Amino acid sequence: MSLSPHSLPSRPSFRTARRADIPAIVAMLIDDPIAAARESLGGEDYRDYEAAFAAIDADPRNELILVEVDGEVAGTMQLTFIPGLSRRGAERLQIEAVRVAAPYRNRGIGRTMMEWAVERAGDRGCALVQLTSDKARSDAHRFYTGLGFTASHEGFKLRLS
Amino acid sequence: MSLSPHSLPSRPSFRTARRADIPAIVAMLIDDPIAAARESLGGEDYRDYEAAFAAIDADPRNELILVEVDGEVAGTMQLTFIPGLSRRGAERLQIEAVRVAAPYRNRGIGRTMMEWAVERAGDRGCALVQLTSDKARSDAHRFYTGLGFTASHEGFKLRLS
């Protein structure tokens, strides 16, 4: 593929999500074959999401990240820094809710997001970065392994009614 | 096995860990073939652990739990309540660092611990309980599946130096 100079892809930029970003983030969470089955967006009622956003925003160990390319929403992920006694008291970074917006997929943005998150974890002194990925996402598994992650664990989930 | 009345096993009791419990908890974390490889207990220096304990203790979304049987330390686990926009803004409970002390294994204490944690998650309105378990722990996997958990995810870890 050859790109003319004006169409060279811009680098993604990263910032903490704001309240006004909630609809765009929810749209990305839902635009996913696995997640769509469990989300039931009830029209324009974002009250539940706004309460969750406020909880994340006020928590110094949780960060909801918005990724932009040329000012457009391109991706999201949530970072949770978990303190623990294991590994001599080191924090671990857990990454949840990783999504790249449909028009921006297959352009290396997911890789840039993970590299950014791992660098954040290193700067903070975390001993470990962890995430789980649905076993149905076989492409994602090659992606994470390619980034140096090891699929060393089984990820167990129990849904509560 | 028949038990005389005075040897009937007592029910485990649960409480939030205190600073004085750190050595007992660290001993349980280390007394494990998988974890032992990554922990290097440097004599009696618990400073790193104490800083991590203080961080957990001050965080309303992290709880370090101590399990006792007849006043003796029998187990530990850490609960982390993670807010998120997924699942209509529901919290999820993540369980980490689950250990049963050697003399208390194979007595159903692990099951009681998980049931207690799942009940806590339900009381708090969590939509999901999640944990990862090293693939080398095949016994643990049957245990979690038997409790209703689904091994639906790959658990990826990246160690930072």
Image: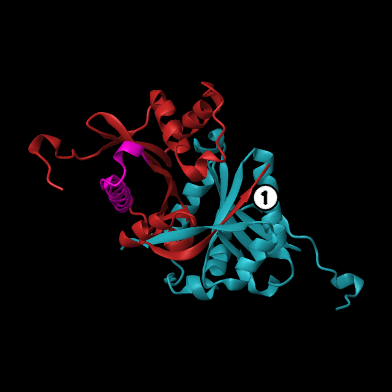
Chain colours: A cyan, B red
Q: Position of residue A117 (x, y in %)?
A: 66, 51
- Position of residue B133 relative to residue B76, above or below, is below
Main SS, magenta region, reads helix
- Disc 1 element: helix
Q: Position of residue A124 (x, y in %)?
A: 65, 39
Task: Answer yes or no: is residue A100 visible.
Answer: no
Residue at the limit of the structure toward the bottom, as seen here: A1
Residues B25 and A144: in front is B25
Residues B16 and A39: in front is B16
Residues B126 and B130: in front is B130
Q: Please check the rendered image and state whether residue B4 is part of the magenta-colored stretch, yes or no.
A: no
Image quadrant in which you'd find residue B107: top left
The residue at the point 51 percent across, 48 percent down is A56
The residue at the point 43 percent across, 28 percent down is B22
Residue at the limit of the structure toward the front, as seen here: B1
Residue at the limit of the structure toward the top, as seen here: B44
Magenta-tinted stretch: B100-123
Side of B119 where A142 appears, left or right: right
Residue at the limit of the structure toward the left, as seen here: B5
Side of A73 where A137 appears, left or right: left
Q: Position of residue A114 (x, y in %)?
A: 67, 56
Which residue matches tag 1?
A: A118
Q: Please check the rendered image and state whether residue B120 is part of the magenta-colored stretch, yes or no.
A: yes
Amino acid marked by disc 1: Val
Quadrant that contains the C terminus of chain B: top right
Q: Position of residue B58 (x, y in %)?
A: 45, 32
Chain ID of residue with mark 1: A
